[in-house]
Image: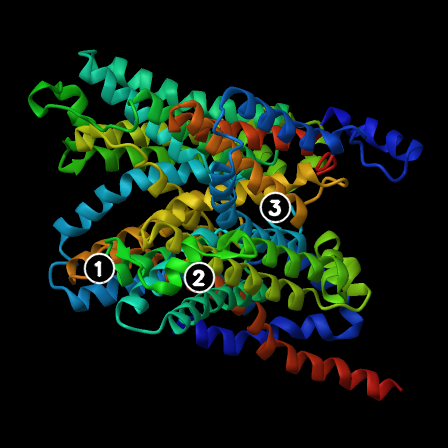
């Protein structure tokens, strides 16, 4: 509502300096400096779509189900979303570095497999965590080697790692048999990661929030993050300007795999089991969440806060549909439609909101030229 | 990025070749012959007519869907993240099979059931094409469609196997056209039609132009969006045909199969690079790649290798293919 009124009032004073031919040199500088009061509908509106859709989902399900907007349920949703958040944050780093990682589900699966097997074998929780992370990092290392050393496009490289990883998983589990842990035999230290709570906040959620904060600061507030972003967007320019593009890419794929591996360990701990190929479910949602989140950025850049909005959209959608009794069959449809709607609206608004802005500008542009001739 | 300095020099010396050694164009075929020979020597059943026919049958599904994906990649450009890709082919194929099975189960005539299934596929293709034409990345548009089609498949089938019976579908499974199994005949027909359309018609040549350099194509007066839009419809329609062939072969529509065949279709389409002289995605290459992958799967099964290894072998295959693409020297200056 507020955006509409702003957008009808502002374009006039927004465009008047641009179009007067005398002051042509001044407006570009002020536009680059990006003064906050300068409002451009085509820049701002598309960025509001994902939050608006999120709010719409919240409102709709609150109206449809009395349980939905209770603090217990919302905390449960956040807890459910924690693993997807971990995976999606890992994907954010990779996408920011200009790649994509389809094997992130394999990293998650192998980490869950290793952790579950270690616990089943009677190892201590920290050993299980270490082994799990090591398995996940191995996947990241393979990706990094393929992409950085062999210079294979990231999509295809990680796709083949997905193939190979699925095979490895089946070989390690004897044809894809799940590992179920006896609840009584699982050490508390391990069960805690997926099921414990600190001050009433579930531990997976604590993990997700901590990781989100650290990665956000890392990507947006450190030199590494700036260099990574530059490499992702202008690889050649970064290389020429002396950035270590290879190492930056390696760090992105390793971090992505490590976060997915952490998600895998949490998943194994939460479910007291390893179920083969459960990681693949997260890959597509993570990609969707990252690119929904990218609409929050003016440059279409993947960011941690944006990704979290995307994750919440998917998580609330799934939970709300469960609560109003729609079977899980419909959830893929809802997610696909949500993804399409958000992304398409972002593109359409970027285009069409220019239309109400341009006509007066055009008129003013035409007026002096006709007067001159 | 160490070869960036080498590539321009090579270009000056040999302006038309893009860094790939000449023998590489034949290495792919050599590998196929080698693998077939190994299987033929180690398993006496491999080259029997019955087994060859079964292998061709297996190849048909991946080949037909692969042709569609190849058209999308040719028209959209083969840069995967921003170029043409259709991740929804597997899900659309699965959906088409389910729609045909459910429609036939409710007593609809087989031709109209098939028509309905193909209509659904084309609808998915229109949505894909429109989203891409509006400006969505193909990767994301088709990812969303993959979720939607997969979900619709579950909703329509109720997540249970739907039997597909009837004389028409049995003919699709067991019948023969000119001595060939029907699926193989369909594969060859699709190859002939799409292959001729891509290489012998104005539309096909222009599609290649749009894929290789959209800016140049636009400057030359083409409307790239139109060709890209059509490519997604072709891809979805061929995926629908493949889905019906698959469901007929299995005598049922199995939910969840779409996700499994997606990887094979992507593999087949991208592997076609190895079988083309210029090392680009091509329809002939897709056909050879589909036959090769089917022969590999079949040969491994005959040799008694556990099915888990087949996936690993496919993964390694993609990597070999991509190493070849890397040799081609693409993407060095990005």
Q: Residue furthest right?
A: B13
Q: Nearer the viewer, mark 1 or mark 3?
A: 3
Q: Residues within 10 Å of mark 2 (few under 14, many from 20)?
A: many
- The answer to whether residue A10 is left or right of residue B74 is left
Secondary structure, mark 3, is helix
Determine the CA span between mark 1 and mark 3: 43 Å
Q: Residue furthest left?
A: A184
User: As displayed, is residue B199 above or below residue A304?
Assistant: below
Mark linked to residue B287: 3
Residue at 72% across, 74% down: A19
Across the whole image, how many numbered discs are drawn on residues?
3
Dots 3 and 2 on the same chain: no
Residue at 51% across, 68% down: B126
Mark 1 — residue? A321
Determine the CA span between mark 1 and mark 2: 18 Å
The quadrant where residue A330 appears: bottom left
- Residue under mark 2: which chain is it in? A
In the rendered image, residue B298, in percent from the top left (x then y), is placed at 46, 33
Q: Nearer the viewer, residue A283 or B265?
A: B265
Mark 2 — residue? A340
- The answer to whether residue B125 is left or right of residue B231 is left
Q: Nearer the viewer, residue A149 or A164?
A: A164
Residue at 60% across, 77% down: A355
Earlier sequence position, callout 1 versus callout 2: 1
User: As displayed, is residue A329 above or below residue B320?
Assistant: below
Dots 1 and 3 on the same chain: no
- Residue under mark 3: which chain is it in? B
Q: Residues within 10 Å of mark 1 (few under 14, many from 20)?
A: some
């Amino acid at each position: 509502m507020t955006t509409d009124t702003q957008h009808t009032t502002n374009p006039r004073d927004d465009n008047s300096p641009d179009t007067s031919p005398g002051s042509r040199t001044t407006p570009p500088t002020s536009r680059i400096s990006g003064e906050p009061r300068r409002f451009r509908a085509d820049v701002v509106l598309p960025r509001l779509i994902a939050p608006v859709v999120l709010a719409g989902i919240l409102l709709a399900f609150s109206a449809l189900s009395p349980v939905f907007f209770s603090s217990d349920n919302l905390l449960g949703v956040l807890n459910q979303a924690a693993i997807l958040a971990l995976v999606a944050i890992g994907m954010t780093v990779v996408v920011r570095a200009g790649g994509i990682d389809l094997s992130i589900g394999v990293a998650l699966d192998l980490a869950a497999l290793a952790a579950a097997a270690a616990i089943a074998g009677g190892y201590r929780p920290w050993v299980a965590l270490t082994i799990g992370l090591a398995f996940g990092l191995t996947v990241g290392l393979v990706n990094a080697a393929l992409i950085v050393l062999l210079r294979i496009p990231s999509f295809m490289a990680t796709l083949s790692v997905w193939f190979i990883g699925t095979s490895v998983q089946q070989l390690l589990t004897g044809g894809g048999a799940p590992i179920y842990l006896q609840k009584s035999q699982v050490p508390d230290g391990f069960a805690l990661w997926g099921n414990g709570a600190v001050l009433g906040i579930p531990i997976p959620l604590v993990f997700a929030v901590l990781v989100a904060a650290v990665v956000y600061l890392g990507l947006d507030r450190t030199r590494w993050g700036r260099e990574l972003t530059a490499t992702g967007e202008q690889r050649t320019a970064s290389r020429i300007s002396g950035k270590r593009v290879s190492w930056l890419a390696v760090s992105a794929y390793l971090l992505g795999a490590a976060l997915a591996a952490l998600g895998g360990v949490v998943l194994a701990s939460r479910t007291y089991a390893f179920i083969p190929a459960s990681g693949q479910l997260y890959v597509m949602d993570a990609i969707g969440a990252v690119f929904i989140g990218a609409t929050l950025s003016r440059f279409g850049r993947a960011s941690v806060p944006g990704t979290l909005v995307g994750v919440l959209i998917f998580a609330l959608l799934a939970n709300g549909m469960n609560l109003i009794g729609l079977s899980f069959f419909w959830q893929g449809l809802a997610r696909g439609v949500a993804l399409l709607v958000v992304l398409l609206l972002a593109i359409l608004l970027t285009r069409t909101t220019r239309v109400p802005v341009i006509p007066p500008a055009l008129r003013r542009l035409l007026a002096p030229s006709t007067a001159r001739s | 990025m160490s070869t960036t300095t080498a590539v321009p020099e090579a270009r000056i010396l040999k302006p038309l070749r893009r860094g790939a050694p000449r023998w590489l164009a034949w290495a792919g075929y050599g590998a196929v012959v080698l693998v077939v020979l190994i299987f033929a020597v180690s398993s006496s059943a491999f080259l029997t007519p019955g087994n060859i026919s079964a292998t061709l049958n297996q190849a048909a599904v991946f080949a037909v869907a692969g042709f569609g994906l190849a058209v999308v990649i040719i028209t959209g450009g083969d840069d995967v993240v921003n170029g043409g890709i259709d991740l929804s082919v597997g899900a659309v194929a699965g959906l088409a099979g389910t729609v045909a099975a459910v429609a036939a189960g409710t007593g609809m005539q087989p031709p109209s059931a098939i028509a309905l299934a193909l209509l659904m596929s084309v609808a998915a293709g229109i949505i894909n094409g429109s989203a891409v034409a509006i400006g969505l990345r193909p990767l994301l548009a088709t990812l969303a469609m993959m979720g939607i089609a997969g979900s619709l498949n579950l909703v329509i089938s109720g997540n249970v196997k739907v039997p597909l019976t009837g004389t028409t579908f049995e003919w699709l499974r067991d019948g023969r056209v000119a001595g060939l199994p029907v699926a193989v005949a369909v594969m060859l027909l699709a190859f002939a039609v799409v292959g001729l359309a891509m290489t012998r018609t104005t539309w096909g040549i222009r599609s290649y132009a749009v894929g290789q350099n959209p800016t140049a194509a636009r400057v030359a007066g083409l409307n790239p969006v139109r060709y890209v839009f059509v490519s997604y419809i072709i891809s979805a329609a061929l995926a629908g045909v493949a889905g019906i062939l698959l469901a007929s072969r299995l005598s049922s529509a199995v939910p969840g199969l779409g996700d499994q065949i997606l990887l094979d279709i992507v593999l087949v389409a991208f592997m076609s690079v190895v079988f083309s002289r210029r090392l680009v995605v091509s329809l002939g290459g897709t056909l050879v790649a589909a036959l090769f992958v089917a022969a590999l799967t079949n040969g491994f099964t005959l040799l008694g290798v556990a099915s888990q290894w087949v996936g690993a072998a496919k993964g390694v295959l993609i990597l070999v293919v991509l190493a070849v693409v890397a040799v081609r020297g693409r993407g060095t200056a990005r």
